[in-house]
Amino acid sequence: MKNRKTTDLILAKIKEYDKIVISRHLRPDGDALGSSKGLAAALRASFPEKRIMLASEDASENLAFLGPDDGQPDDAFYSGTLLICLDCGNPERLSNKKYALAKEIIKIDHHPNIRPYGDIMWVEPERSSVCEMIADFCMRYKSEIVTTGEAAYFLYTGLVTDSGRFKYSVNGDTMRVAGFLLDKGINTELLFAHLNLDDFSWLKYKSFVYRNMKITPNGAAHIRITCKTREKFALTSEQASETVYMMESIKGCLIWLAFIDYEDGSTRVRLRSRFVQTNRIAEKYGGGGHEYASGATLRGSKQINSFLADCDALLYEYKSTHEGWI
Ligand SMILES: [Mn+2]
């Protein structure tokens, strides 16, 4: 069992504090939402005498079916609290500007630990999701932590979304905790209906993307979504960000990326890949993320073109030196 001493310490801290605040990264995805809601539900069931708040300053429209959060507690609540930060590589990205008010901070994350923060860190970049880590935590200490059906539903949501429906970074541990969660009784039919069904208008946007996307000579699939396009299809920034996933299943395109323009003149690039690791390109432009899923903020067409050229050059190098890619 990896990092047992760290998780022992985390459990001891949870027991020690009367007030616990749980936070996650801004613009939350299924993992950020699932892990924060799942941990909050499990801790409330386990320690009903403690005051546990899920403090968040934003939410997700697509994942609204998971229900509302607790909002942001006032400053006074933070005195003498333990803050647990989930799925968030650096404190600036927390959906909680009051994080520094907490007495102690625990970082639990599966992004590379480039920006260490907090008093205790439990970081395992090889994990499919933070939900997998929280579920593992619940499983390790199952005599003390009560994993309710609701908590299991939240955690399973992040497990399936961050792993791309059990496609990425999956190993035996992932499936063992998936089994542990399923044993709590999860309505997977309802969950996958929530996750998979689309409005017809979304399919029309998808067809726009397939008609307008381009592929570089060495196989980087890409599209730029302008503010005008976002307006035309009434896309939220969350929906615009999802554009990248539409290009993930093209043979020979080992890299796919979406450039999303914002009103302030910046362009957020979301970079994804298979076989070839691409986070170093995002890092070169001041961004970062996982080996196969990263992003950066760019300015102007010149920077966008050079980002794209870097991706194409990497693909040229990779394809001419490797076999077995599809
Ligand atoms: Mn995650």
Image (cartoon, rainbow, N blue to C red):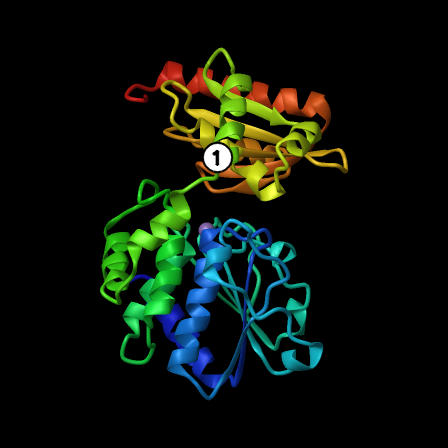
> Please, what secondary structure does the residue beneath circle 1 have?
helix
Q: Identity of the amino acid at label 1?
A: Phe
Front position in the image: 170 or 164: 164
Residue 100: x %, y % from top left: 66, 69
Q: Is residue 281 left or right of residue 190?
A: right
Q: Is residue 29 above or below residue 122?
A: above
Q: Report the residue at 30% width, 19% height from top.
A: 323
Q: Report the residue at 48% width, 50% height from top.
A: 111
List the single residue furthest toward the top. Answer: 217
List the single residue furthest toward the front. Answer: 200
Front position in the image: 202 or 113: 202
Q: Residues within 10 Å of mark 1 (few under 14, many from 20)?
A: few
Total residue callouts:
1
- For the C terminus, the quadrant is top left
- For the N terminus, the quadrant is bottom left
Q: Report the residue at 43% width, 32% height from top.
A: 277
Query: Which residue was labeled with disc 1?
Result: 200
Q: Is residue 312 left or right of residue 58?
A: left
Q: Is residue 8 above or below residue 194?
A: below
